[in-house]
Image (spheres, rainbow, N blue to C red):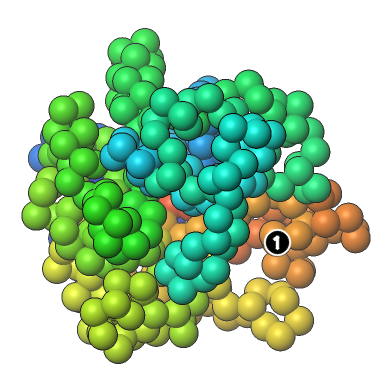
């Protein structure tokens, strides 16, 4: 998109609960949002969203990871939700817990190892839906990618798998202590798959949001899913702001495959598709490549019009995920040959922020916060 449409990005703010259409349109033109509207506290732009907590420094989706992200100053902290056998919502990026817990070290659960097809992909391991919450609580979390983040293995075994209700209680306690709400960003994982198993995500999630006062439009909470149907269902249950996650252009959301809807992500990122999303959601969470595609050599190419088009429909744009390590960066921002070494991530942040995005997911919130502050100061 043309960067001329964002002449003053450092002065732009967006409402924390995703603003009304008129406000979002003003943001896309570089205007400053009011300090408050309809009681909603504003969220800095670009906002820094702690991806699975401070997962660059601690095992992901643990109270330790969430606490560190909050202590670093992250604007929002993400949780991914999957169910247990007895219907409790727990925080894991996937229901396959083989790589994120010590379940393989528990002989009493050896017989639970199995092969399943989840959203068309065959996986062999241990799965949350085969464990009661009491059984799951006997496990300990560990680093998911130890080859790249060896330092994080120091914290293996320190934390259990948290329930979402435990996170809500933690957020309440920290909010009282800090005198401000702790913002959460909550994803429903594989909702169609779990609904078929009789373990729906949306209704239990809505019940918890209502119990902890996060069910309103001005809630310090975002909901998100790769399945648009999940967000449409949540829109009928709570007023909490909703975001549709978007993968590669040729991807077809799993709920679309199940229902026979022929649309792909490429269809959803057109003005017509974005207008459809805006009919039930307040934002999109695109893959970073949808904002700036990579060329054949892995370097960043020319930005697309997605940010401008989404803002024109009143949608905030929170792409994912920027990480410090070379292995995750565009080729032109890598430094050296060590995949675990840090590259020129500040240069990458500057390139993405220049497109006018409203926020970004990152594994290293401290780096993202510094980059965002530098960008706003321009």
**Residue appearing at x 76%, y 69% in the figure:** 331
Residue 183 is drawn in which quadrant? top left
Residue occupying the point 61% across, 37% down: 103
Residue 85 percent location from the top left of the image: 35, 41
Query: Residue 362 location, x and y as percent?
Result: 56, 48
Relative to 64, say whether 238 is above or below. Answer: below
From where the camera sits, is residue 284 visible?
Answer: no
Badge 1 element: loop
Looking at the picture, tell me which residue is in the foreground, 120 or 186.
120
Residue in the picture at 46% in, 84% down: 250
- Asked if residue 370 lies left or right of residue 121, the reply is right
Image quarter (top left, top right, bottom left or bottom right) of the N terminus: bottom left
Tell me the quarter of the picture where residue 314 sits: bottom left
Q: Residue at x 39, y 31 (%)?
A: 133
Residue at the top extreme of this rendering: 177
Q: Is residue 88 left or right of residue 39?
A: right
Residue nearest the viewer, comparing 67 with 330: 67
Estimate the x, y position of residue 105 in percent, counting from the top left: 69, 34
Residue assigned mark 1? 329
Q: Quadrant of residue 84?
A: top left
- Compared with 207, 1 (above or below) is below
Query: Is residue 41 visible in the rendered structure shown here?
Result: yes
Expressed as whole percent of the image width and height from the top left, the position of residue 269 reads: 35, 79
Q: Residues within 10 Å of mark 1 (few under 14, many from 20)?
A: many
């Amino acid at each position: 998109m043309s960067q001329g449409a964002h002449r003053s990005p450092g002065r732009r703010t967006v409402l924390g609960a995703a603003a009304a259409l008129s406000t979002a349109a003003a943001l896309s033109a570089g205007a400053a949002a009011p300090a408050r509207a309809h009681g909603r506290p504003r969220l800095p732009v670009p906002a820094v969203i702690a991806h699975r907590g401070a997962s660059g420094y601690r095992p992901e989706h643990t109270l330790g990871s969430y606490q560190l992200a909050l202590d670093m100053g992250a604007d929002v902290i993400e949780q991914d939700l999957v169910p247990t056998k007895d219907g409790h919502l727990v925080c894991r990026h996937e229901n396959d817990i083989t790589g994120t817990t010590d379940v393989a070290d528990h002989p009493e659960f050896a017989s639970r190892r199995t092969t399943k097809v989840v959203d068309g992909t065959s996986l062999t391991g241990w799965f949350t839906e085969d464990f009661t919450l009491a059984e799951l609580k006997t496990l300990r979390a560990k680093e998911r990618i130890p080859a790249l983040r060896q330092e994080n293995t120091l914290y293996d075994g320190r934390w259990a798998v948290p329930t979402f209700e435990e996170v809500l209680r933690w957020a309440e306690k920290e909010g009282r202590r800090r005198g401000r709400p702790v913002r959460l960003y909550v994803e429903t994982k594989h909702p169609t798959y779990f609904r078929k198993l009789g373990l729906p995500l949306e209704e239990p999630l809505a019940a918890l949001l209502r119990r902890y006062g996060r069910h309103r439009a001005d809630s310090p909470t975002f909901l998100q899913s790769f399945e648009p149907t999940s967000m449409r269902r949540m829109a009928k249950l709570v007023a909490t702001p909703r975001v549709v996650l978007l993968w590669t252009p040729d991807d077809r959301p799993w709920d679309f495959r199940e229902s026979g809807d022929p649309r792909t992500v490429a269809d959803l990122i057109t003005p017509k598709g974005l207008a459809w999303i805006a009919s039930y959601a307040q934002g999109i969470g695109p893959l970073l490549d949808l904002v700036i595609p990579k060329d054949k050599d892995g370097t960043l190419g020319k930005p697309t019009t997605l940010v401008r088009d989404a803002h024109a429909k009143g949608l905030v744009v929170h792409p994912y995920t920027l990480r410090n390590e070379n292995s995750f960066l565009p080729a032109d921002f890598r430094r050296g040959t060590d995949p675990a070494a840090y590259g020129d991530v500040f240069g990458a942040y500057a390139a993405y922020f220049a497109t006018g995005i409203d926020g970004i997911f990152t594994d290293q919130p401290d780096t993202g916060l510094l980059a965002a502050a530098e960008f706003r100061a321009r």
